[in-house]
Amino acid sequence: MIVVMKADILPESPEVQQVIKMVERYPNVHAEVRKIQGATRVLTEIYLLGSTAQIPQEPIEEFPGVEKTIRIRERYRAIGRHDGAEAFGFVHNGVRFSQDTFHIFPGLCAVDTRENVDTIFRALAAAGIRTTRAGAYKPRTSPYDFQGHGKACLPFLFERAGKHGMQVIAMEITHEAQIDEIRDALRAAGDPTGVMIQIGTRNAQNFELLKVVGSQQDFPVLFKRGMGITLDESLNACEYIASSGNNRIILCLRGMKTNFGDPHRNFVDFSHVPVVRRLTRLPVCIDPSHSVGKKDAAPDGLLDIHHVTAQGIIAGANMVLVDFHPKPEEALCDGPQALLLDELELFVRDAELVRRAYLERLALREQLARA
């Protein structure tokens, strides 16, 4: 059961303690208090764990400071879209993320040279884009492949981001020590940008790492679905993060590893966008680059990457993570799937067109529902 307190009630308020004192009289019931960033406001929620079926809702809702109670029936206690539970939303470095927003994160899969970082950020700024991806730490299948420049590239990466007005950078980590490296480098640079920590598909069930990123509050988390696990297993991994204290999570669909997806690199799973939005309170991201893995064009002239991006956006995706590179043939990681900078305008305008179509679908549904 979740007890949602009124907007002006803080976790340390006496009204919260009054509710806890009452509910913990019931045997085998434990209360946890959490400060939740909802889509429209910050809320204090009390999670009642254990044998909660014995607890009546009405007496709790009569307590001063209580807005409502929500009976949890689904498995995802922290991230689930339970009846009456508000969707998560948050603002990071001036950029708002929720199930109602939309952002494109074009950028380098892996940071390679200062020149390429500067070229990418300058092009994004000219296109009016303030969000990007840039990999400093790169887990690879082979130990002999490029693993990223690591913390050595963070100073110039953050300096360039500040110069060109990049507000949020999505960046994968592979070890908990890298959180401190990012935090220290940002502080040393004067906090010129914001970082969204990315949990890559290979670490989707690294539960100790999930607990660590969940226990810190400096960075939101972009969680990539595990390439070879079920959606339920991936959502439970997000539950690890949220239950550790950080509910600023975006779930990213990036394709599943199976030959059923051939000739694409992975089987595109963007039909799960509305499923994730229905089951959880999380915003949803799509990664067409790692799903498709190449730059093949359809007979209509549009790349497969464009088509699968449109499939995810028309289904309600809130964020798109996509690879761009000034010279893909020289990229140290995933060059064959990276789009060129002269393809940026088409990708962005096409994505925005599909997003408008999605909003028109919603408006049409509401119009006909009122008729």
Image (cartoon, rainbow, N blue to C red):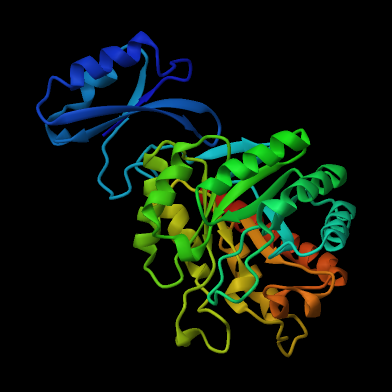
Establish if 310 lies above or below 194.
below
Q: Picture quarter containing residue 311?
A: bottom right
Left or right: 331 as drawn, with respect to 247:
right
For this orientation, the residue located farthest to the top is: 14
Q: Picture quarter containing residue 332?
A: bottom right
Task: Provide residue 162's location: percent of width, then percent of height.
Answer: 82, 42
Residue drawn 53% across the image and 46% down it: 177
Task: Provide residue 242's location: percent of width, then percent of height.
Answer: 41, 42
Q: What is the count of numbered marks?
A: 0
Res 363 visible? yes
Q: Picture quarter containing residue 147?
A: bottom right
Residue drawn 40% across the image and 14% down it: 12
Establish if 37 lies above or below 115.
above
Residue drawn 65% across the image and 52% down it: 170
Left or right: 72 as drawn, with respect to 260:
left
Front residue of 300/276: it is: 276
Task: Provide residue 120's location: percent of width, then percent of height.
Answer: 83, 60
Residue drawn 37% across the image and 53% down it: 207
For this orientation, the residue located farthest to the left is: 27
Establish if 86 lies above or below 229.
above
- Quadrant of image for the N terminus: top left
Res 191 visible? no
Establish if 148 lies above or below 38.
below
Task: Provide residue 241's location: percent of width, then percent of height.
Answer: 42, 45
